[in-house]
Image (tube, rainbow, N blue to C red):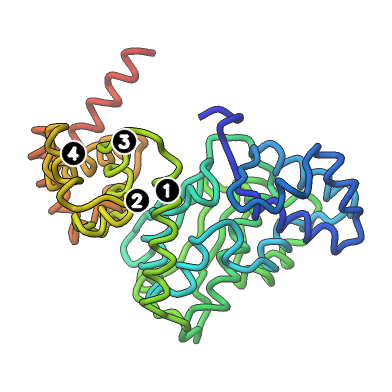
Amino acid sequence: MSLEQAKVVSKMVRGLVNHIAKKRVSRDAMLSQLNINESDLNNPDYYFPLSLYNQLYEFGEAQTGDAYLGLAFGADSDPDVGSEFGLIASTCGTVADVLKYQSRFSTLVRNFDRFELITEGDILNIRWSTELPVTTHLVEEVFARRSFFITKYILGLDEAIFKQVDFCHGVSDRDQTHFESVLGCRVKFGQPFNQITCNKSILSYALKTPDRDLCHFYEGLAQKKLVAQTQGSIVEKVSLLLMNALPDVLSLDHLSKDLSISPRTLQRQLQKNGYTLKELYNEVKRKIALESLRAGHSLMTISFKLGFSEQSAFQRAFKRWQGCTPKEFQQLHLHNTNTED
């Protein structure tokens, strides 16, 4: 993905503009500096390039002298900044549900980063990464936003949920204890990964405001928006819906409602393209597994995303699809990559 293809939704940009404006920075000056207007800023379906979001942070720090700008914005933000995903998250039943929906709908907020789950015994590392240039403010915003969400929405906070937060970048001339106060745990800089370390048991933690009906309502809105983002064939549209629903399985009736056609029509169109719904569902899972293995994702992350209850079940399914184990596939991919180099 090129820098020009990396996007953030207008609501994120608007939220940051509003946050900086509270610090007595001229709103008109910000918009003029970035060559954007209020009309685009207030359009929930408008996407801005990531480069503009980086520039906004740089301009904001230059104008305010606030070296903690991203940290403060993340801690001050409502969880619905960006898209329906935040609304879904606030109505989920458990932390595991939130992570599931994050995997499905994160592209409604932005498309330049990813989260991965890494387990080490009873420890869970929630790792964030991007291949694109981002300011340290943006990284700190991402982690502060998650700390805010936990504080506001998760039940039973008898102890700190975050054990440690690691940042790849340095602390510079800033006060490390301020970061630890905002994030509520130990913070380390100059680490190999940007990640949150916590106990794996947090996946079962309940949220304070679960609402199954409202969650399903927001989920439907998000799915329709994802469908609207593609103009491809019926196979591409159904594949996108199936992919974004993982680890859940969508029925023919559910899919037909999202596509505004009858179940019988959808079934015929899939058959015309050589698929049953079950076959297409397995093909979607196979492709995601291959992409994830090439990207170096952990088997737990892939199993979680595809809806397998155990890593062993994923390994058996993968061997049926490809005739080799996931580990053998990764070794072959690594060998081919090194040979090409």
> Residue 219: x, y in percent?
40, 63
Within 10 Å of the Cα at label 4, are there few (<14), some (14-19), or many (20+) other Cα atoms? some
Residue hosting label 1:
226
Q: Callout 4: helix, strand or loop? A: helix
Label 4 to label 2, Cα distance in Å? 21 Å
Q: Nearer the viewer, mark 4 or mark 1?
A: 4
**Nearer the viewer's eye, disc 4 or disc 3?**
4
Residue under numbered circle 3: 291
Helix, strand or loop at mark 1? helix
What mark, if any, has residue 244 been given in the picture?
A: 2
Of pointers 4 and 1, the one earlier in the residue sequence: 1
Please report whichever mark, 4 or 2, sits nearer to the chain's N-terminal start. 2
Residue 82: give x, y in percent of width and height: 58, 56
Instruction: Report x, y in % for residue 335.
Output: 27, 21
2 or 3: tag closer to the N-terminus? 2
Front: mark 2 or 1: 1
Q: As shown in the figure, which amino acid type bears the numbered disc 1?
A: Leu
Q: Are marks 2 and 1 in contact (CB under 8 Å)?
A: yes
What amino acid does circle 3 point to? Answer: Glu
- The amino acid pointed to by label 4 is Gln
Cα distance in 3D space between marks 4 and 3: 27 Å
Q: Compared with residue 207, is residue 231 higher up or lower down, i.e. above or below?
A: above
245 or 296: nearer the eye?
Answer: 245
The quarter of the rendered structure image containing the C terminus is top left
Residue linked to disc 4 = 269
Residue mark closest to the camera, 2 vs 3? 2
Label 4 or label 2, whichever lies nearer to me, is: 4
Q: Residue at x 58, y 40 (%)?
A: 7
In the rendered structure, which amino acid carries the disc numbered 2? Asn
